[in-house]
Image (spheres, rainbow, N blue to C red):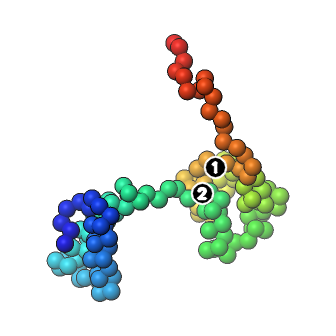
């Protein structure tokens, strides 16, 4: 029984196994079982945030997800962004989202702007090379 912060993967697995039984029969609020469930959920969440962080979603994947879940098509995206070519380039990661595009997607399709502003590389774009001068501190 876990009664302290989870520190190892083995303790994490044990906590998951213990909390699993509460999903089959959810405890009634105000009971010791409900308190135990809440405690386990907090401990598991804290461990996962530290050891299994989930990064922000890719902006284009957020758009694709919204299209799937809301039934939007690429043609709908084209209307929103102003052209079929622009919609195609965005979905193919050949064109970056601009601030006006982000604003339109956020307003019209209710995609959080924070999920769309994450920087990303375009197809075929290389990472900038680290130069020797970039690593040295500049003289004041």
Left or right: residue 129 compared with residue 42 = right
Image coordinates of residue 123 in percent, x first then y, are 73, 52
Seen as rendered, the residue at the extreme top is 140
Whichever of callouts 2 and 1 sits on the residue coming sooner in the sequence is 2
Identify which residue, 3 or 29, lies in the foreground.
Answer: 3
Identify which residue, 108 or 89, lies in the foreground.
Answer: 89
Q: Which mark is residue 58?
A: 2
Image coordinates of residue 22 in percent, x first then y, are 29, 81
Residue 60: name its quadrant.
bottom right
* Disc 2 crowd, CA 10 A, few/some/many (<14, 14-19, 20+): some
Residue at the image position 32 percent from the left and 64 percent from the top = 9
Q: Are marks 2 and 1 in contact (CB under 8 Å)?
A: yes
Point out the image quarter for the N terminus.
bottom left
Left or right: residue 132 compared with residue 98 = left
Image coordinates of residue 93 in percent, x first then y, are 72, 55
Residue at the image position 78 percent from the left and 60 percent from the top = 88
Residue at the image position 60 percent from the left and 23 percent from the top = 133
Identify which residue, 92 or 132, lies in the foreground.
Answer: 132
SS under mark 2: loop
Q: Which mark is residue 80?
A: none
- Above or below, 123 against 4 in this view is above
Left or right: residue 88 compared with residue 62 = right
| Residue that carries the numbered disc 1 in the rendered image | 120
SS under mark 1: loop
């Amino acid at each position: 029984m876990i009664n302290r912060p989870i520190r190892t993967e083995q303790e994490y697995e044990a906590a998951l196994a213990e909390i699993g039984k509460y999903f089959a029969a959810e405890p009634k609020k105000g009971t010791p079982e409900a308190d135990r469930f809440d405690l386990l959920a907090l401990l598991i969440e804290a461990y996962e945030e530290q050891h299994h962080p989930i990064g922000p979603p890719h902006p284009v994947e957020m758009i694709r997800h919204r299209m799937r879940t809301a039934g939007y098509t690429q043609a709908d995206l084209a209307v929103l962004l102003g052209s079929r070519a622009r919609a195609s380039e965005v979905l193919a990661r050949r064109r970056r989202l601009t601030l006006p595009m982000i604003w339109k997607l956020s307003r019209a399709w209710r995609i959080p702007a924070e999920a769309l502003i994450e920087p990303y590389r375009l197809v075929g774009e290389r990472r900038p090379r680290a130069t020797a001068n970039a690593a040295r501190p500049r003289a004041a």
